[in-house]
Image (tube, helix red, strand yellow):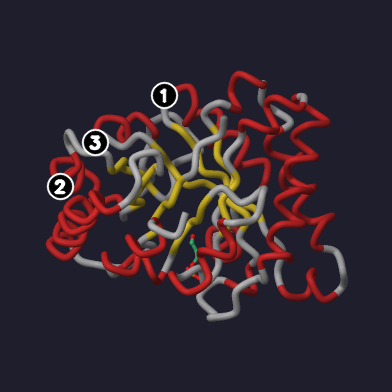
Amino acid sequence: MRKNIVAGNWKMNTTVPEGVQLAKEVVEKSKEVPAEVGLIVATPFTHLCPVAEVLKGTRVELSAQNCADKEKGAYTGEVSVGMLVSTGAKWTILGHSERRQYYGETDAKLVDKVQLALAAGLKVILCVGENLDEREAGKHFEVVKTQTENVLFHFTAEDMKNIVIAYEPVWAIGTGKTATAEQAQEIHACIRKVLAGKFGAQVADDTTILYGGSCKSSNAKELFAQPDIDGGLIGGAALKSDDFIAIAKAF
Ligand code: 13P
């Protein structure tokens, strides 16, 4: 059985003290969320160590938002998977559209990053999603299918146990424009079909697929009620503990 997860992607927000405070509030309020719902906070690199201290012994898991595509060495400014593991992080987001769009993240680079992350024992939240032009041209299924295949077809059914997929239509991120529950559901079902074709029905059925893009407490219930939507990757609404927890309570 796949797990329901609500993950907060803090992006480039909060100072270290603000992040520590936010993490404390999430831990405190996590009691209100059914135990079977997985809770993750994805903080900036600088926050990982102090937030790991806050999360120690709690149900809330720690994630990074990216990792280097090299193991170690002379790569100024980069952060390796080994460094992430040493902070206490259990997860990393990879392939977020903001990284694809602004920092030239390619599917090929993502294969290397996912490989390194899994080898280091990190779990991965791999993001896919079409932009507005692609949606308007009716290419959304094709784009998401290609992104999924380009990265995940390099991995095994066993690897898939440690990979979660997040469908984030770029036109819905930070815009207040959520995909309708039907629009999200049909893409999630398509992703699951792609997984079934490669890895078999069991793996497809066991893989958690999150929705992201202007997800908030007012629309989470309808989104999470869809058969192939297993939770959310939350941006803006993850920066307020009440909003984040309200979303997690929407199951
Ligand atoms: P918003 O929830 O702010 O639209 O961001 C979604 C997102 O990009 C999460 O990774």
Mark 1 Cα-neighbour bin, 10 Å: few <14, some 14–19, many ≥20: some
In the image, residue 101 lies at what x, y percent? Answer: 60, 64
Q: Residue 87 carries which label?
A: 3
Q: Give how far apart the Cα atoms at labels 3 and 1 are.
A: 13 Å
Q: Which amino acid does label 1 sit on?
A: Gly
Quadrant placement of the N terminus: top right
Image label count: 3
Residue labelled with disc 2: 50
Q: What residue type is labelled 3?
A: Thr
Left or right, residue 21 beside residue 178: left
**Does residue 76 show up?**
no
Q: Residue 121 carries which label?
A: 1
Q: Which mark is residue 68?
A: none
Going by the picture, which residue comes out furthest to the top?
Answer: 158
Left or right, residue 158 beside residue 46: right
Q: What residue type is labelled 2?
A: Pro
Q: What element carries label 1?
A: loop
